[in-house]
Image (tube, rainbow, N blue to C red):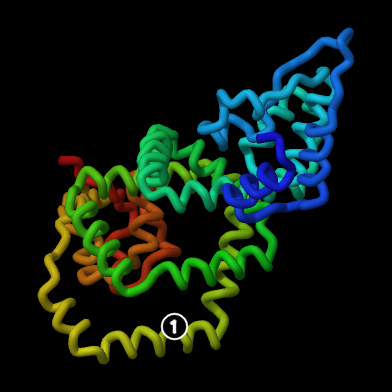
C-alpha cells in the first residue's frame, strides 16, 4: 500500500542496516508525492524493488510511472540509502558516471557478507571459483599474486598475518596436514609442484630476485628471529605426542635423483636427503643444480664432497 510508514518499515525489515535514513525518507516521500507530466516519456518503477521484494512485484500500489530523469534520480537515492550491489547495478547503465568509492565499497562488503551467510550459495561459489582457478596457468597465478603483494601496505600485511593466525586453529592444521600428505605421496604431484616452483622462479626478473635474496639474508642473519625459531622447534620436539607421530610417519617416496659424475659414473638416490647424508651437500644446492644441465662448481664444494665437482644432477622421471 502507498503508505510512508508501511514502505519504510518493509525496507528496514528486509535490510536491517540502512546507510542513510535521510535518503530513504527522501526516496519514499518523492515517489508518494510525484505527479507525472502527461507529455513526458515514462518508465515504470517498483517502489519496493522486485529484486528484493518479489512478493510485491505485481501489486498495483507498488508500481509508479516516472519520467526518465526522475527514474534515474530515485534509483540513485535508493542506492545512497541502502548500499547493496542489487541497488547499485541499475546505475551502471542509468548513471554510469556516478562512482562513489565509499558506497560501492560498502555494497561489495555487504554482498560478501550476504554470500557467506548463505551456506549453500557460498559453497557453490567456492567450488566454481576453485575450478576456475585450477584452469589458470602458473604464470597467471603468479601475476595476480604479485599485484596483491606489490601493493599491500605494512598495516594490511599485519592484519593479513593476524587473520591467518586466527584461521589456522588446531583442527584446521590437522586436516590440512592430512590433505598435504595425501597430495604429496603422489609422485606426479611432487613433480608438478617442483616444476611450477622452478618455472615461477625462472620467470622473475633479476631485480625481484635480488630483493628477495637480500630480504631472506636479513631475516636469516637476525639473531632474535633465529633464536625464536630455534626455541619454537625445540619446544615442538619436547612434546611426546609429536615425537610419537614423527616416529610413525610414512616416508614419502618422492622423485628419484640421478647424479652423473664427470667420469661418467651414475648414482641414483631415492630423495635429496640421501644425497645430503652421503655428501653433506645442501638441499638448496641440489635444487639449484637439478635439471639445469649445469655442472657442480668448485666454489660450492668442500673437502668432503669435492668428488661431486663437474657432476650433473637430474630428476629421474618414472
Location of the N terminus (image quadrant): top right
Question: Around disc 1, counting alpha carbons within 10 Å, would you say few (fewer than 14), some (14 to 19), or many (20 or more)?
Answer: few
Provide the residue designation for mark 1.
Answer: 229
State the image coordinates of residue 190 (x, y, percent, origin top left).
Answer: 26, 49
* Residue 281 appears anywhere in the view: no
State the image coordinates of residue 267 (x, y, percent, origin top left).
Answer: 16, 54
Q: Is residue 310 above or below residue 221?
A: above
The front one of 115 and 223 is 115
State the image coordinates of residue 274 (x, y, percent, origin top left).
Answer: 19, 65
Q: In this view, does 33 lie above or below 201?
A: above
User: At 61% from the left edge and 57% from the top edge, which residue is drawn?
Assistant: 210
The front one of 162 and 254 is 162
User: At 36% from the left edge and 55% from the top edge, which residue is drawn?
Assistant: 287
Q: Quadrant of residue 143?
A: top right
User: At 78% from the left edge and 27% from the top edge, which residue is drawn?
Assistant: 96
Is 263 left or right of 47, judged from the image as shown? left
* Residue 12 appears anywhere in the view: yes
Q: In this view, does 255 lie above or below 178?
A: above
Location of the C terminus (image quadrant): top left
Q: In which quarter of the image is residue 308?
A: bottom left
The front one of 295 and 14 is 14
Is 262 left or right of 7, judged from the image as shown? left
The front one of 284 and 260 is 284
User: At 41% from the left edge and 46% from the top edge, which residue is drawn?
Assistant: 122
Secondary-structure class at tag 1: helix
Total number of numbered discs in the rendering: 1
Q: In this view, does 238 lie above or below 128?
A: below
Is 169 left or right of 98, judged from the image as shown? left
Is 266 left or right of 137, judged from the image as shown? left
- Spot the residue most to the top: 39
State the image coordinates of residue 140 (x, y, percent, origin top left).
Answer: 51, 36
Amino acid at each position: 500500500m502507498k503508505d510512508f510508514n508501511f514502505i519504510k518499515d518493509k525496507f528496514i525489515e528486509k535490510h536491517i542496516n540502512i546507510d542513510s535514513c535521510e535518503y530513504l525518507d527522501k526516496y519514499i516521500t518523492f515517489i508518494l508525492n510525484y505527479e507525472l507530466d502527461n507529455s513526458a516519456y515514462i518508465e515504470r518503477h517498483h517502489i519496493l524493488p522486485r529484486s528484493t521484494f518479489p512478493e510485491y512485484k505485481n501489486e498495483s500500489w507498488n508500481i509508479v510511472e516516472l519520467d526518465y530523469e526522475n527514474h534515474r534520480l530515485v534509483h540513485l537515492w535508493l542506492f545512497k540509502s541502502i548500499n547493496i550491489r542489487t541497488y547499485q547495478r541499475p546505475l551502471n547503465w542509468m548513471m554510469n558516471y556516478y562512482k562513489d568509492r565509499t558506497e560501492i565499497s560498502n555494497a561489495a562488503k555487504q554482498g560478501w557478507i550476504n554470500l557467506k551467510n548463505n551456506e549453500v550459495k557460498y559453497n557453490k561459489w567456492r567450488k566454481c571459483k576453485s575450478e576456475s582457478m585450477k584452469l589458470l596457468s602458473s604464470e597467471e597465478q603468479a601475476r595476480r599474486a604479485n599485484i596483491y603483494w606489490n601493493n599491500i601496505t605494512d598495516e594490511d600485511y599485519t592484519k593479513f598475518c593476524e587473520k591467518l593466525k586466527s584461521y589456522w586453529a588446531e583442527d584446521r592444521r590437522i586436516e590440512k596436514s592430512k590433505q598435504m600428505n595425501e597430495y604429496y605421496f603422489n609422485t606426479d604431484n611432487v613433480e608438478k609442484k617442483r616444476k611450477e616452483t622452478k618455472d615461477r622462479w625462472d620467470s622473475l626478473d633479476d631485480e625481484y630476485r635480488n630483493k628477495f635474496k637480500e630480504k631472506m639474508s636479513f631475516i636469516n642473519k637476525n639473531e632474535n628471529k633465529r633464536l625464536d625459531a630455534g626455541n619454537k622447534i625445540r619446544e615442538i620436539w619436547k612434546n611426546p605426542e609429536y615425537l610419537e607421530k614423527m616416529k610413525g610417519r610414512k616416508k614419502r617416496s618422492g622423485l628419484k635423483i640421478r647424479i652423473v659424475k664427470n667420469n661418467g659414473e651414475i648414482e641414483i638416490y631415492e630423495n635429496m636427503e640421501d644425497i645430503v647424508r652421503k655428501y653433506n651437500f645442501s638441499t638448496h644446492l641440489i635444487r639449484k643444480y637439478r635439471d639445469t644441465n649445469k655442472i657442480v662448481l668448485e666454489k660450492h664444494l668442500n673437502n668432503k664432497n669435492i668428488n661431486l665437482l663437474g657432476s650433473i644432477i637430474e630428476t629421474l622421471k618414472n
